[in-house]
Image (cartoon, coloured by chain):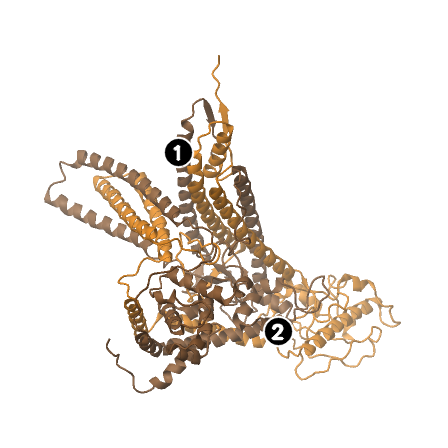
Amino acid sequence: MLPRDCSRRLVTELQGALDACAERQLQLEQSLRVCRRLLQAWEPTGTRASEPPPGPETNEEDPPPACTPSPQDLKELECLTQALEKAARVRRGITKAGETDKAPSLKSRSTVDPPGTKAFAPPRTPGRAGGHASDTRPTKGPCQTTVSAKGHSERQLLSLGNKTRVGTGAWAPRPGPGLRDQQMAPSAAPQAPKAFTLKEKGHLLQLPAAFRKVASQNASLWAQLSSMQTSDSTDAAAAKTQFLQNMQTASGKPQPRLSAEEVEAETGRLWKACSLLRLRMREELSAAPTDWMQEYRCLLTLEGLQAMVGQCLHRLQELRAAVAEQPPRPCPVGRPPRASPSCGGGVDPAWSSQLLVYSSTQELQTLAALRLRVAILDQQIHLEKVLMAELLPVVSATQLQGPPWLTLCRAAHSLLCEGGARVLTVLRDDPVD
Amino acid sequence: MGRRRRRVDPAAGALPEAIAALSRSLPSGPSPEIFRRAKFDRPEATPALWQLLFRVLAPLPLDNALASLAPEVQARLVKSALRSQGYPRLALAQLPEDGSQGSRELLLALSWLLARGPVPEQMLAQTRVPLGDEMTVCQCEALASPGPPAPQVRAEEPVDVRHVQWLMGKLRFRWRQLVSSQQEQCSLLSKIHQYTRGCHGDQSLGHLSVAEAEMLRDPEGGQVSGVGTPRNLDLAYPKGLHFSCTPGMGPRTFWKDLWLVCEQPCLLLACSLLSPLRALLRTLECENRRLEAVLAWRRTELVFWRWMDTVLDTCAPGAPAATSQGTFLPRIPEHRGGELELVAWELRALQEELQEAAERRRAAWEAEAGGCGRGPEWSAVRRASREAVETELGALRRRWEQDRDPAQPHGPRRLVRREDGAAGDRDLRAAEVIRTLRSQEVCLEAVLRQLQGQCRQELARLAGALPGLIWILPPGR
């Protein structure tokens, strides 16, 4: 068994790492859920609970055909009517919510926003295809985007009744005798009120106008803020420095002691220094100098590095002294945030309008994987340091020689030297006699 | 103390304006009247200032546990946080925590914080609602612990080392899980970006983000898969609104952001009755107001600083009394000394290695070129080499001395997919980031291997003391 405080620290640290990973996993899973839902067929919103979801099942209940239209036409009409029904529901839902121009431009199959015409005629029952009142919708549709290329499947759907506007990607199917002449896409027939999928029609979406306005205002304000950041007024900066100095002198202390945060920051810097110096040393030692000048430079570099390490150690002594004279300070809430060795702290507000551009899925995956790998390595290194600080003293202090100590040794080796991945074997070497 | 040259003309009006802008730009900003009262150390201004300081200093995420602490506890946390940042005045530590007096001191503390860093901007950046799919490039908060552990003090019994091994194994499994989930998410995200190409009004973005697409899919929030409630209680939606592709931002949810912005839990309830679209619009509008306030503050802050000088003057220079620590909250004991010791060990080991290598090379050099390296032209060459090495090492030193690597910008960025990969001058390209990350990875792996090597040596030394045993190392890599 490990000593009490050692156990506590190890368990706390490991549990903290586990919690952080669990938290991150939760975030990822929630995000995955949202993304998956977005990529599936979108179901119409509004009074969804009371409506049967559209889909293949509704096609099975084909209404009995009237006498005159052919079964094919009736089927087409059925699809059309269902689409209109859905549009009506959506429309009702939209007006009910009172959002006039916030309506997303695309609901399941057809959202029509005809200028000027408010009334939306209720859907007609199938069988009246012959004598319909003109219910032509101006096929202006919501698709005012600049995208002109339209998917083939979408055109097929639109060609239901649409004689003229195929090219502009208008939406609303037009009932009419023209139905008979048009052909319905074979893929559309069995699943006529085809739900909206991002894959096919994603490029037709349009953000609501109110949102666009607020979002662009937001973006421009952030841009102003970040440009103001970079051109900070020197007057204000001077006034601030003066004020800080005045505060310092008024407090009666001659010189600021090192605050705990500064000690932590310095420690982080020293870690960084250590790893950079070590890397540099390795580079120098592995480089093969070809002439004496390079050798001389190599020598000078090594000696320079040695001097720098000496300075770091000196700084460390100062820090140690500063820490020793401060009473142990409590951390206000829980664990102190660990200063990452490769990045300084502080939130820089001047990031708002900057983008990260990628060009393929592969690239994004590589980027994210590397990012995660670096974070995991960070965590691993931190844990390694903690384990070293806790386990090595225990192993060296334990005086037992029997199996318990061997177990401890094996475990310590596995944790410290193999990252917990492999375990070594210990054999007793009995002399043969 | 000399009087500063006072601005005659619009100073009278500029100060209230500046203070008003400041209070609008801060969350739960007190009214300008409070500031004025605080100058004269009026007691009624104290509670508001304690609250404000707590909001500024409290670590995010500001969850309910933190927000519902008693005022005395909040005051103690403020004191402790200020001390840890090095606040110079001792009078603050001696203030009573019940909010009965000390408003002037609190005002000074607030100004001290404002002078040291861009506090309103930082607070805005922390509570910003991201509209795009964001990824942080730097390592801040990477897989950071999510705040205080659930039970403040864990089981105090000593554990067996096998328990530690088990925990480690669990952790390794979770890492693997994260990697695979992450990959899947990236591919889905990329698809969504691809399919919504051409939709966004902003040409530089070009496609929708997950949050925007989700908002279009379900603006009413009525889509609750499988649950009958028509109103928006689907938590995946607000959380999906905040997407972070990496171990980046902490667990900020949409609702937390709303609370932080709207400041009142009752408003949160009201917002929860709104559709997400409306709630989002309202949040954005709030944020815009605060942004405008910050811009106004930055324009007029000079007047404020001059006023603060006068406030400082009115303070009697108090003699620093003996520092009484007061009672602090229960804490997890810190091992700051331990960390320093580790660094010391590392540095000493490095020093030994360098010493040995340098001496060896020096001896070899002296032996070889000692004779011919004395002439005048040689010394010029030698001086040049020395200078070159000094410059290089100086650059190396700067890399760890400055807190932030300027080449690696900070903060989350919006992910944008572009087939041609064209990027503006302020934008980052994924290829560059990948390069940087790879080099970081190599660096970190080297550090890890080196630490492990040290452990190996140490353990070998300890185990070698025991005769009669054979240690078979696992098959190495």
How many numbered marks, from 0 up? 2
Res B450 quadrant in image = top left
- The type of residue carrying mark 2 is Ala
- Element at label 1: helix
* Label located before the other in sequence (1 or 2): 2
* Residue B477 visible in the shown view: no
Q: Secondary structure at mark 2?
A: helix
A128, above or below B396, in the image = below
> In this figure, which residue is indicated by the disc labeled 1?
B457
Query: Could you say which disc has been placed on residue A412 in the image?
Result: none
Chain of the residue under label 1: B
Task: Determine whether, in the image, residue B180 is placed left or right of residue A391.
Answer: right
Q: Is residue B54 left or right of residue A46?
A: left
Q: Nearer the viewer, residue B197 or B52?
A: B52
- Palette colour of chain A: orange
Using the rendered view, name the quadrant where residue B34 is placed: bottom left
Q: Residue furthest left?
A: B376
- Which residue is tagged 2? B270
Instruction: Look at label 1 and name its amino acid.
Output: Gln
Residue B205 picture location, percent across and down: 51, 67
